[in-house]
Image (spheres, rainbow, N blue to C red):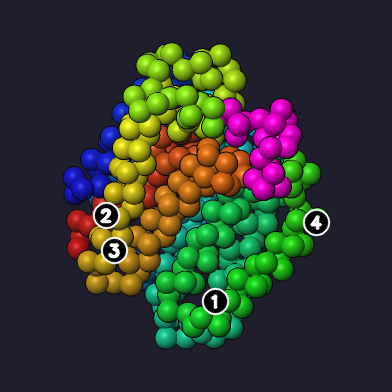
């Protein structure tokens, strides 16, 4: 069991260290969320998640409930960081899309584990696409491009690993491309288009669209192997690095602690993903295998989009680095997924 908690603990330590240097208030808030996350782990690690396979109404009810929360957030929620995707719960803000990721993993795990013999049928593929496109469409309207991409990755990842023939996979990808082209012209905001184009033209708009990425590159490039020291990162401390606690926390960490620590944090997350996949390979039920697969995909996609935007190979889409970035919604979701993996490992 320690094989999944050691890398998580390593990342969390450096998360708190980085946040304490960036903002004392965010550091204290993250501590509160961390305590809630540990409570989630204690409570949900003792749940028999196999029962969800037999009680389909639970997983589908949870999925519909998360769709309802997305609608409430979009229609009545506040606009925070340019998106209408938040719910206010007392003194805290929460993003329902984080619950959608959990619901989609559970729904797909149940759906594909029951239909592995008829996976190649168009009805199966289209139904799985509808399960993804409904919440993804609502998320894109907020607009939250990063979360929509995560939901797509969950859907497409399940298709790739569920035994679907190659022709069907290509057809499913083509279906998404068609939806993506429509979304490019009618769904995305202009600044989203500019961020995507900025990846291909990093030398342009260095003071506007590409400003954040350029400052992130400067922070990383000036860090050296061992960094500038705690609280000594000029890009971070002087406010040149935008969103150092969330989108660019990896750059903020590297600037003060060096490339060596940054690589160790990345390695810790990759070790966690590999160990989750290992747990999935040792389970006997396809449902549990898919739960592990979905969790590994979520962590991996968050890492790719966050770290990729930090160095400029992906557009900045507001995706957190698992267990490292500040954010209660993200941290609680990660601990919930970790609790399911722990329960599966224990039961196996």
Does residue 242 appear in the picture of this structure?
A: yes
Identity of the residue drawn at 80% across and 56% down: 185
Q: Could you classify mark 4 by the number of other residues whose Cα lies within 10 Å: few (under 14), some (14-19), or many (20 or more)?
A: few
Q: Could you classify mark 3 by the number of other residues whose Cα lies within 10 Å: few (under 14), some (14-19), or many (20 or more)?
A: many
Q: Which residue is mark 4?
A: 185
Pointer 3 with pointer 4, Cβ within 8 A:
no
Q: Earlier in the sequence, mark 3 or mark 1?
A: 1
Q: Which residue is mark 2?
A: 275
Identity of the residue drawn at 66% across and 40% down: 202
Q: Earlier in the sequence, mark 3 or mark 4?
A: 4
Front-lying residue, 84 or 150: 150
Q: Is residue 323 left or right of residue 312?
A: left
**Residue 329 versus residue 226 in the image, above or below:** below
Pointer 4 with pointer 2, Cβ within 8 A:
no
Q: Tag 4's secondary structure?
A: helix
Q: Tag 3's secondary structure?
A: helix
Magenta stretch containing residue 293, yes or no?
no
Magenta stretch containing residue 200, yes or no?
yes
- Nearer the viewer's eye, disc 3 or disc 1? 1
Q: Is residue 83 left or right of residue 222?
A: right
Q: Earlier in the sequence, mark 1 or mark 2?
A: 1
Q: Which residues are magenta?
A: 197-216
Distance of mark 1 from mark 2, alpha carbons?
A: 27 Å
Q: Is residue 137 left or right of residue 217?
A: right
Pointer 1 with pointer 2, Cβ within 8 A:
no
Q: Which residue is mark 3?
A: 280
Q: Earlier in the sequence, mark 1 or mark 4?
A: 1
Distance of mark 3 from mark 2, alpha carbons?
A: 9 Å
| Residue 88 drawn at (x, y percent) | 59, 32
Q: Could you classify mark 2 by the number of other residues whose Cα lies within 10 Å: few (under 14), some (14-19), or many (20 or more)?
A: some
| Residue 36 drawn at (x, y percent) | 37, 33
Q: Which residue is mark 1?
A: 169
């Amino acid at each position: 069991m320690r094989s999944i908690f050691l890398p998580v603990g390593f990342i969390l330590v450096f998360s708190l260290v980085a946040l304490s240097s960036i903002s004392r208030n965010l550091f204290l808030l993250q501590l509160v969320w961390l305590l809630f996350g540990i409570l989630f782990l204690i409570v949900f690690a003792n749940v028999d998640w196999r029962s969800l396979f037999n009680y389909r109404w639970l997983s589908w009810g949870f999925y519909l409930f998360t769709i309802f929360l997305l609608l409430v957030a979009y229609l009545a929620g506040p606009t925070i960081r340019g998106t209408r995707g938040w719910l206010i719960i007392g003194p805290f803000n929460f993003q329902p899309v984080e619950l959608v990721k959990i619901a989609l993993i559970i729904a797909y795990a149940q759906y594909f584990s029951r239909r592995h013999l008829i996976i190649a049928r168009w009805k199966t593929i289209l139904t799985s696409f509808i399960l993804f496109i409904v919440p993804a469409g609502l998320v894109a309207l907020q607009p939250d491009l990063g979360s929509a991409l995560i939901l797509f990755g969950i859907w497409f990842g399940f298709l790739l690993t569920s035994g679907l023939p190659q022709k069907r996979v290509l057809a499913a990808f083509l279906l998404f491309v068609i939806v993506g082209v429509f979304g490019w012209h009618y769904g995305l905001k202009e600044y989203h288009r500019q961020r995507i184009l900025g990846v291909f033209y990093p030398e342009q708009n260095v003071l506007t669209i590409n400003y954040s990425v350029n400052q992130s590159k400067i922070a990383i490039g000036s860090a050296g192997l061992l960094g500038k020291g705690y609280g000594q990162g000029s890009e971070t401390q002087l406010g040149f690095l935008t969103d150092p606690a969330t989108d660019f926390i990896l750059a903020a960490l590297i600037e003060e602690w060096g490339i060596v620590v940054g690589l160790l944090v990345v390695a810790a997350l990759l070790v966690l993903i590999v160990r989750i996949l290992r747990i999935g390979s040792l389970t006997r039920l396809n449902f549990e295998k898919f739960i592990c697969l979905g969790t590994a995909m979520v962590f991996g996609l968050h890492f790719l989009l966050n770290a990729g935007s930090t160095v400029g190979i992906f557009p900045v889409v507001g995706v957190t680095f698992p267990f490292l970035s500040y954010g209660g919604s993200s941290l609680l979701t990660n601990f919930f997924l970790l609790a399911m993996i722990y329960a599966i490992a224990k039961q196996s």
